[in-house]
Image (cartoon, rainbow, N blue to C red):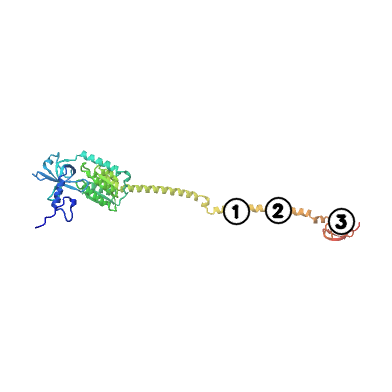
Amino acid sequence: MSTPPPPLPERAADTTAEAPWPVRLLSLKIGDYVDRMSVLWVEGQVVQLNQRPGAKTAYLTLRDTDVDMSLSVSISVHALSAMARPLTPGERVVLQAKPAFWTQRGTLMLDARQIRPVGVGELLARIEYLKTTLRSEGLFDTDRKRPLPFLPHTVGLISGRGSAAEKDVVENARRRWPATRFEIRAVAVQGTTAVADVCRALADLDSLPHVEVIVIARGGGSVEDLLPFSNEALIRAVAAARTPVVSAIGHDVDTPLLDHVADRRASTPTDAATLIVPDAARERAIVASGRATVRRVVGERIARERHRLAEVTGRPVLADRTAYVRARRAEIDALRRRIRVRLDADLHRQRDLVGHLRTQSRTLSPQATLERGYAIVTEADGTLVTDQAGIAVGDLLRVRVARGDFAVRATDS
């Protein structure tokens, strides 16, 4: 007699490697859980719509507008027919549905009861709300916007495949600066894959070191056509890019949120070309004008210096290089003559003075007195005799006259 198998765990948390749930039980459990979910309203973008002639049920794929995630939806043809206009892929809708899990295939889908398109007014209101939220985070602040390079090495361009926007940017940029180089990423710029394609292209170009500015360009369109460029995921991707980004979406009246987060906004794709590269003709004109100004200023400076040099060289001292030496030599000769005259005059005066002093000294000298008949009497020891009282009879005295001397003895006269 065989042993009956052990009972299966009632809860998922009670399962083990020895007591697992079979796939059928897990599918049933998931189905039971999903069946208990309430009817709900969900919003998304219609990616694919399959409606076979004569069938009572149509199938569509509903995709999230911000991330790459989607669900299959079944809806009755009558619910589709109740719409004011036919449903087209790429349109944003809200629908009332009941989640359903197909246990046989293990897939989750939505059983839709009602479907409504999202109106333009509602879309604009949501964009405005998102705009307010992003502005409060500082993503639109002016101080975070980076300046564009004067002449980028390479321009990254994200645009539609073979679009007029791509042609406008490339042709006008090369018309302004013929050597402009581009890294072009052709992507879908509207529809269900636009946001993901643009984000991937942006990340690709942002990773290239030689790409110094990125242009995201698209021609004009309806509000619905330009919705990808107001998508939150795309806006945050642009804000996080290290390379300056130029937004060139639609016409001047179109202002998607990309215009606010980009480093520069171009009113049209053609205007983007004027922002990313300079005008070669204008730059040449500026250089030519600068060269002319420099030439004129330098010419005027040279003319002034030549005039000053002519004035300096026109002076006699420079016109005749020996004139200065001759003038100084004449001054020296004049000084020599003046010195000689003065010296001669001084010598003459000094000679006269010497002669006068000599005459005076001769006149006043003892010798002159002696020559007039006077004599000098001294005692034997040389003492001058000036008083008779000091002389005794018999003292030997010496008498000096003008021509020699002789001795005498004092007697009693």
Q: Which amino acid does label 2 sit on?
A: Gln
Q: Is mark 1 on a helix, strand or loop?
A: helix
Q: Which amino acid does label 3 sit on?
A: Gly
Residue 124's place in the image compared with 413, above or below, is: above
The answer for how far apart the CA atoms under marks 3 and 2 are is 47 Å
The answer for how far apart the CA atoms under marks 3 and 1 are is 71 Å
User: Is tag 2's residue or tag 1's residue first in the polypeptide sequence?
Assistant: 1
Residue 136 screen position, x and y as percent: 29, 42
Q: Is mark 3 on a helix, strand or loop?
A: helix
* In front: label 3 or label 2: 3
Q: Quadrant of the N terminus?
A: bottom left
Farthest left residue?
54
Residue 243 screen position, x and y as percent: 29, 50
Residue occupied by mark 3? 390
Q: Is residue 29 visible?
A: yes
Residue occupied by mark 2? 350
